[in-house]
Amino acid sequence: MTRPTLTGTPDAVPTVELDDLIDGGDLQLIDRWLAQAGEVQIADDLARLPREQRAVAFRLLGKDRALEVFELLDPSVQQELLEGLRDTNVQQLFDGLDPDDRARLTEEMPAKVAMRLLAGLSPAERQLTSTLLGYPEDSAGRLMSPEVASLRATMTVAEALDRLRRIGASAETIYALPVTDDRRRLVGVLGLRDLVLADAPTQISELMDTDVISARVDSDQEEVARMMREADLLALPIVDTEDRLVGVVTVDDAMEVLEEEDTEDIARAAGAEPLGRPYLATSVVQLARSRVIWLIVFIAAGAVTVNVMAAFETTLEAAVTLALFIPLVIGTAGNTGAQSATTITRAMAVGEVRLSDLTPVVGREGTTGLLLGAILGAIAFGPIAVLIGTPIAAVVSITLVAACTLASLIGSALPLAAKRLGVDPAVMSVPLITALIDASGLLIYFIVAGLVLRL
Amino acid sequence: MTRPTLTGTPDAVPTVELDDLIDGGDLQLIDRWLAQAGEVQIADDLARLPREQRAVAFRLLGKDRALEVFELLDPSVQQELLEGLRDTNVQQLFDGLDPDDRARLTEEMPAKVAMRLLAGLSPAERQLTSTLLGYPEDSAGRLMSPEVASLRATMTVAEALDRLRRIGASAETIYALPVTDDRRRLVGVLGLRDLVLADAPTQISELMDTDVISARVDSDQEEVARMMREADLLALPIVDTEDRLVGVVTVDDAMEVLEEEDTEDIARAAGAEPLGRPYLATSVVQLARSRVIWLIVFIAAGAVTVNVMAAFETTLEAAVTLALFIPLVIGTAGNTGAQSATTITRAMAVGEVRLSDLTPVVGREGTTGLLLGAILGAIAFGPIAVLIGTPIAAVVSITLVAACTLASLIGSALPLAAKRLGVDPAVMSVPLITALIDASGLLIYFIVAGLVLRL
């Protein structure tokens, strides 16, 4: 993959990276770099700096640019940056944010700091932010902007454009315009494009799309974001229990949610808790903490494998050669199970597989595992038969068929079971699944060995 | 996670799923269901049907709705659907698509079918589609729409709005408007919002943002999409080598690219090739084919683990108890390595880690592995010492420390090495990494055992 060539943009100019300049310590050079770089690049490079150095570079930005860069940062980095700034700067930045960004940042702050900052806002701004903070975490309510530009169905195009010129500047988006009736209930939606292209005297009710897709304020953020992606929406109106318009979620916020959720799912699949912050801004202790739980679960579950092995110690003593293939057999089964689990977890996340698909999914995964086990067993048989002997080769091959089938069944059933229990399917991580498969694979191996070798 | 409550939308009405109705075979019921359901739901449910049944349901849709539903389908499903339709229907659908969607669909078709369909287009439409097909696969050129509504810097706001009323209906988006000079070179960008809110006589050159972020037509799609997400752009102007505007990538297409790329990375991480189609529309043979390669690589690499074990067969015979802990030790190291690999691969994908970060990344992963190994070794020591004996407990604990450290080093270094070689880092999959770690973990285990137990 080649890095896209950024053309005609100041983002392309600096070939030096900010961290090298900061290491150099020449403030004038840093200042010149900041003047040339685009906001996206500044935000990117700031996140990579050690926390003490971020405030240095940040204070060199002008007030307006500082806000733009700040809005592009990850909430965890925003918060650390605030800690390094003086109080007046902090309140200034906080004032300048949109209510939804402010609510998200506030979540991460110590309550005392958040209260002080909220107290410094104008009453109207404080009201907006507190409303958002009243919705459950990860709900559409936290993600939406309450500053929504809406139209009335009874307006004409000319009146609507007039209204937008008055209120449009403060609204989060005016590209998708929710249309309401006189009780603020959502009755339609109109794209700015259609409004601009229409004749002045036309009524909004004639233009608007009444097939409007909306979501409730307590919906899950990830589901809302996936819905927007599926339906290619720039903005999604959010309504309360009585179908009254309360806000709008924009596509940029939806994209961010999806990226975060995917990062979370990917981390969980490998048995690590999501970091919730940029990698290079994470300490080794935080890294270890995010991963240690599932490893401990694996080690604890490993006691089962040790017991299975111990139960068959006499078999092992009689044929130590059996031990040679243990890593191969359980590794292959573990990998097969991990493939199933990962595929099903992702298919559920993107909405391709639903809970009601349990039977077809487990059925096709079991068949796939059987097919894979047969192929791998056939491949392994020849070399082992030649080098070690046919009986051991038969044991390994038969075990591969049975263990791969079982592994695929376990790997596909567990994420679906988790979903049914209301747990994130991604929690059925590779370490957990390998632990289960290791134990059952070993059991199969020794039972098959006992039968074939008559031990 | 609760399903978002879709309110005031026909999407919420049908509680039956389309596949159940098709199984029933009552065309009237299916017809009524289709009339009530929203396009997104129809597209979702169509993708879940067996291929033969899709055309049945699809033909019951009206012409305009058929096109809308078709545009929401995955290209692989679109293609299969086309195969089930009569030629006139096919050409009608193909005509109605946007040039970028048409180019993507054509990629998946047998060349003969594609040529015939392209021949049926109007010369102008054919020209647009062929131009897109001339760009490399996965380039921004394939993703962009050439139907871009652009403004001239010398226009007034009134002239610009007039122009949009004339050409706006056919453009892919008019929300972000690229501004060009008299040689079609990109000089700025203007949001429709700013245009609508401005006074009629103002010149575009005064309103436009000259800090424009753009990408070259040969840039990689994923990088372009991540850039749009980072900078919160609704549309990104695409230019040729001479900085002339040739198209625009819209945020909905960027979101789709990101979802596909994430799906791909997730599949690869588990050692499976991406399916490139919805899960339930994939056959068992296709599933097995997507997974078998890395399993075979693992089995082949497994020959090394068998050899390591064989080399230490006398050690094993002297202390069969050692065998009991083999699954535990290599499983733990494998999981630790997979955690590192997954974390680093994701951090690179979202742009948090760059190639130049090799030293700090491998350094902090090695330290994390050491820390994890120490914790796990400490946990394992007590129970093993009590149940089996101190010497074996020491062997297991020391091995865990060394093997986890090595696993984290391998797991973090390999994705970075792949990137440097120009290979997708996600290809450094869990099966490959576990194979390497199994062999080295066993080696460490037996060497430590030899030293501690003096065998």
Image (tube, coloured by chain):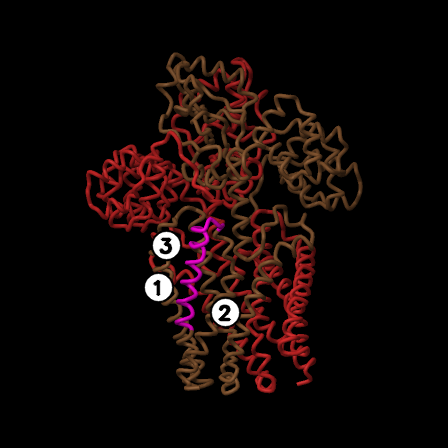
Chain colours: A brown, B red
Name the secondary structure under disc 3.
helix
Tag 2 or tag 1, which sits nearer the N-term?
A: 1
> Label 2 neighbourhood size at 10 Å, few (<14), some (14-19), many (20+)?
many
Total numbered labels placed on residues in the image? 3
Q: Position of residue A59 (x, y in %)?
A: 75, 34
Asked if residue B168 shows in the view, the reply is no
Which amino acid type corresponds to the residue marked 3 in the rendered image? Leu
- Which of the labelled discs sits on residue A358, or is there none? 3
Numbered range of the magenta stretch: A400-424
Residues at marks 1 and 3, CA–CA distance in whole angstroms: 14 Å
- Which of the labelled discs sits on residue A97, or is there none? none
In the image, what residue occupies the spot 51% across and 39% down? A255
Q: Which one is in front in this view, the residue at disc 1 or the one at disc 3?
A: 3
Name the secondary structure under disc 2.
helix
Q: Which residue is mark 1?
A: A367
Q: Position of residue B40 (x, y in %)?
A: 36, 38
Predominant secondary structure in magenta? Answer: helix
